[in-house]
Image (spheres, rainbow, N blue to C red):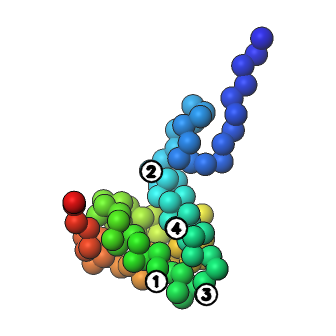
């Protein structure tokens, strides 16, 4: 009997044995935030994505996604890309507070 592994395009999924990079996960998350704001124009959507990332992502995550964009940003949807471009290096440490 052969065992099959289901493929999941979700990089957050651990249903297969393929390692997923942190960058893949961050791109997925940024694009998911963008999908939430998809009904809005790109300027509004990107501003809301940037606001969410600034408020809720750990500074290490923000630094990583900014560095990823600086290296080309493959896979980022247009609104997410625009949001991360707007963040800039100073945003990497801004806004995050632990509760």
Q: Which residue is mark 2?
A: 22
Q: SS of the residue at dot 1?
A: helix
The reply to whether discs 1 and 2 touch (Cβ–Cβ < 8 Å) is no
* Residue 73 % position (x, y): 52, 67
In the picture, residue 3 is in which quadrant? top right
Marking on residue 99: none
C-alpha span from label 1 to label 3: 10 Å
Badge 3: residue crowd in 10 Å (few <14, some 14–19, many ≥20): few
Is any atom of residue 67 visible in this view? no
Q: Which residue is mark 1?
A: 47
Q: Which residue is mark 4?
A: 33
Is any atom of residue 4 visible in this view? yes
Q: Residue at x 48, y 47 (%)?
A: 21
Q: Residue furthest front?
A: 99
Q: Earlier in the sequence, mark 1 or mark 4?
A: 4
Q: Residue at x 22, y 60 (%)?
A: 99
* Residue 87 % position (x, y): 38, 79
C-alpha span from label 4 to label 2: 17 Å
C-alpha span from label 1 to label 2: 24 Å
Q: Nearer the viewer, mark 4 or mark 2?
A: 4
Q: Which residue is mark 3?
A: 41
C-alpha span from label 4 to label 3: 14 Å
């Amino acid at each position: 009997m052969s065992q099959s592994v289901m493929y999941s395009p979700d990089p957050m999924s651990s249903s297969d044995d393929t390692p997923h990079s942190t960058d893949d996960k961050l791109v997925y998350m940024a694009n998911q935030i963008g999908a939430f704001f998809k009904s809005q124009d790109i300027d509004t959507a990107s501003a809301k994505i940037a606001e969410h990332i600034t408020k809720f992502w750990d500074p290490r995550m923000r630094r990583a996604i900014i560095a990823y964009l600086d290296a080309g940003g493959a896979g980022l949807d247009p609104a997410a890309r625009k949001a991360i471009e707007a963040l800039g290096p100073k945003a990497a440490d801004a806004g995050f507070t632990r509760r």
